[in-house]
Image (tube, helix red, strand yellow):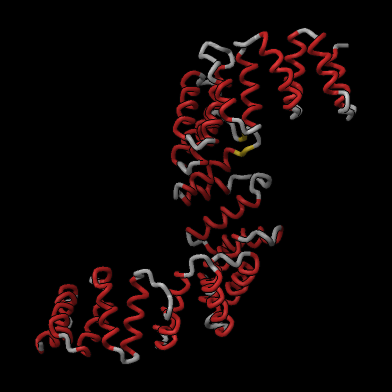
Amino acid sequence: MTKADEVMDTIDAGDFTKVDSLIKQSLEQDDDQTQFSLAETLMSRGLSVQAKTIYEHLLVFYPDEGQILSRLAEIAVSDGDSDQALDYISQIGPDSPAYAENLLVSADIYQSQGLYEVSEQKLLTGIRNYPDEDVFKFAIAELYFDENLFSKALTYYDMLLDAGITNYSGISIVLRKASSLAGDGQYEEAISEFEKLNAIELNEDAQYQLGFLYNQVKDYNKSISVLEKLLETNHDYPTAYAILADDYLNIKKNQEAFKYAQLGINLNELDERLYQIAFDAGISEEPDEAMSIIQKGIKTVETPLPLIIRLSDFYVTRGQYKNNLDLLSGVDINGNPKLTWNLAKSYFETDDVAKAQENILLVLDEYRDNLDYLTDVIEILRSSGDKAALKAALTLYLKQDPDNDEMRALMDQI
């Protein structure tokens, strides 16, 4: 029995106290091939520290051996030492049997450093030099997928599928293709691929993606079916609630929409979409609670501006101008055109014509083609008595609606 065999027998017996000493004896007594085989076995067991000891020993005698350099590079990557890994990799030339592995490891290193273009070039070299090695097609597809370059990823996922490869390293290629199609905005095609997945492949994340896609193509009932099934198995899946609440809102089942939005907020109080859906769904059903929810959201979420706009619009459309002024008091509008317009309208309706005119004209460039906006401008300018500005506003309005008798009559009076 070789010392290498004793090492593995000891490990299999669960006794690690003698492993290091037995490895040392193997390095002294076993032949080089036995030592290399031991290192490979240790690597396959995840014992990279012990394997590294053997590879470093062998490298002294075989400094140009690509397989040894490649293994040491892999270990350096796992240890977070990219510079050392690249140093090992750089010693493996194109003529080495380990060159293919060199390209894969170096691509992985460069990707981990954020050097995606360098990583891409390494993998493209592998595809050119080793056209029959599917690992390069898979690796570059994964690189593009991670970079959200979905159309490029699809090219290589399709190559693998055309070769009959539906699963690689435990990853479903069909699922990757479906996700890539979704990321590329090809929703109908993505749904078709998701529907091909078996029960194992259609995991929680895939179910969520499918539910999201049904929502995007306005097939709300199917989205509801998928997402409610997901929440039956995992009610702590936070992103599902916003989609499910939106589904119910779109089919006008406000009570259900309100319920799921509230449940979602309990899991993730930073998702502004949930507050907005809860408000939209609940304002007619539970107005006091809906109002409380959106006000809480404005105080809680990182970017409350969409919620402020939604509540401001509500106040303005309901004629609650004083409430709107109170809402926007002290708020940094940041030049937001909609809030500026709402603010001007609220000033006007509470008899502050000067501030109304000042604010309404700030957003003329953004809304000069909007007849509702121009109607408000004209009304404010009529009250302020600014005939020159009023004439200019009427001119803009009549360019878009030249047959409006009321506005033409007003122009004739100036």
Return the x and y of residue 130 as percentages of the image width and height.
51, 19
- The answer to whether residue 153 shows anywhere in this view is yes
Using the image, determine if residue 123 lies above or below residue 221. above
Nearer to me, 87 or 243: 87
The answer to whether any part of residue 134 appears in the image is: no
Q: Is residue 47 above or below residue 321?
A: above
How many marks overall?
0
The residue positioned 71% from the left and 22% from the top of the image is 52
| Image quadrant in which you'd find residue 238 | bottom right
Is 102 or 17 nearer to us in this picture? 17
Left or right: residue 295 versus residue 345 is right
Query: What x and y, as percent, mark residue 303?
Result: 48, 66
Specify whether 43 is left or right of 102. right
Q: 305 or 396: which is nearer to us?
A: 305
Q: Residue at x 54, y 26 (%)?
A: 106
Quarter of the image containing the C terminus?
bottom left
Q: Where's the N terminus, which quadrant?
A: top right
Please report the residue visible at 24 percent of the width from the left and 86 percent of the height from the top. 379
Residue 393, x across and y down, in percent: 18, 78
Where is residue 131 drawn, in percent x and y? 50, 21
